Image (spheres, grey):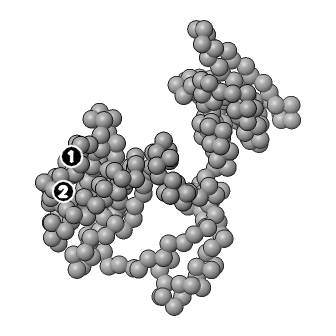
Amino acid sequence: MHIVPVAEARGLSEKMLGQTLVTKQTGAGGKPVNALLVAEKLNLVNEMYFAILLDRQSAGPMIIACSEGGTSIEDLAETHPEKIIKMKIDLDKGLTKKQALELASGLKVSGSLDDAAEQLTALYEVFSKTDCTMLEVNPLAETGTHLLYAADAKLNFDDNAEYRQKELFALRDHAQEDPREVAAGKFDLNYIGLDGNIGCMVNGAGLAMATMDIISLHGASPANFLDVGGNASEEQVVEAFKILTADPKVKALLVNIFGGTGFGVSLIKTRFDAPRS
């Protein structure tokens, strides 16, 4: 992030575009800078935390909020759990005005509770109408004139809702993602790259997790999570092998397939172009 006078914004933007950004979030490889967000600098005097998540226990949305934001909510929940507000939302009713006012009061906003409640309700509408799985605003902040801003936010969307959120999913920038995961997604393969050197191909997410655990238990390290699914076609399996063998870190492959008759089949094959490890 750079804070500059308006007159210098264009020149600095031209220097930033096309560069590689390296942060704790991007990892050592960094991410390409294809777009910039230019925002007005605000004088924030009060920072809060607000998030909407999907709660498995209640099978519906849950709001997690705190009057102290701009920091790690996980650390705060551990040291001061009494400061965390948790509110379950009825899917049929949505966020009611009474609940919104209760949240605004719990967040200790200094301005109008009604205005704050209206903005919190608007955030819930975004969560609901765009098929979010998570909406996190940190910080939700106030200015010295009591205006409430979503100063920084992160949203995750349900991939299964792409068919009705086409405009939203069209904004996706695959350049910011692992190219292996992008390639796997084109063939409906579930792939996540890891740091090990044993490539894994498994049919079933649970079996894949168990296979990775077994590898780690024996002192080795998996190079990936790859679930081809229970009805994988020949084409999908071929593409899965291409993704695995294209990874230079992979020194061996472990294929663990549940055959559907009560047993699993495992195969370890060492790459011919790499030393055994």
Label 1: how many residues lie within 10 Å, few (<14), some (14-19) or many (20+)?
few
Mark 2 residue element:
helix
Q: CA distance from mark 1 to mark 2?
A: 13 Å
Q: Quick one: which residue is furthest to the front in this view?
A: 164
Residue 100 tag number: 2
Against 40, residue 113 (above or below) is: above
Residue 110 can be seen in this image: no
Task: Name the foreground residue: 42 vs 22.
Answer: 42
Say which amino acid is labelled 1.
Answer: Lys
Residue at point 64%, 47% (across, down):
182
Name the side, left or right, on which 261 lies relative to 254: left
Q: Nearer the viewer, residue 112 or 71?
A: 112
Front residue of 266/173: it is 173
User: Which residue is outermost to the right?
Assistant: 273
Task: Please identify the quarter of the rendering in which residue 258 is found.
Answer: top right
Q: Residue at x 34, y 66 (%)?
A: 150
In the rendering, which numbered label is found on residue 93? 1
Q: Residue at x 49, y 57 (%)?
A: 168
User: Horizontal and vertical percent for residue 157?
Assistant: 45, 49
From the viewer's perspective, tell me whether residue 73 is left or right of residue 274.
left
On screen, 93 above or below 103?
above
Position above or below: 123 against 273: below
Relative to 271, is 44 on the left or the right? left
Q: Which type of secondary structure does the marked residue at label 1 adopt? A: loop
Q: Is any atom of residue 108 visible in this view?
A: yes
Amino acid type, residue under disc 2 in the picture? Ala
Residue reaching furthest to the bottom: 7
- Of labels 1 and 2, earlier in sequence is 1
Marks 1 and 2 close (CB-CB < 8 Å): no
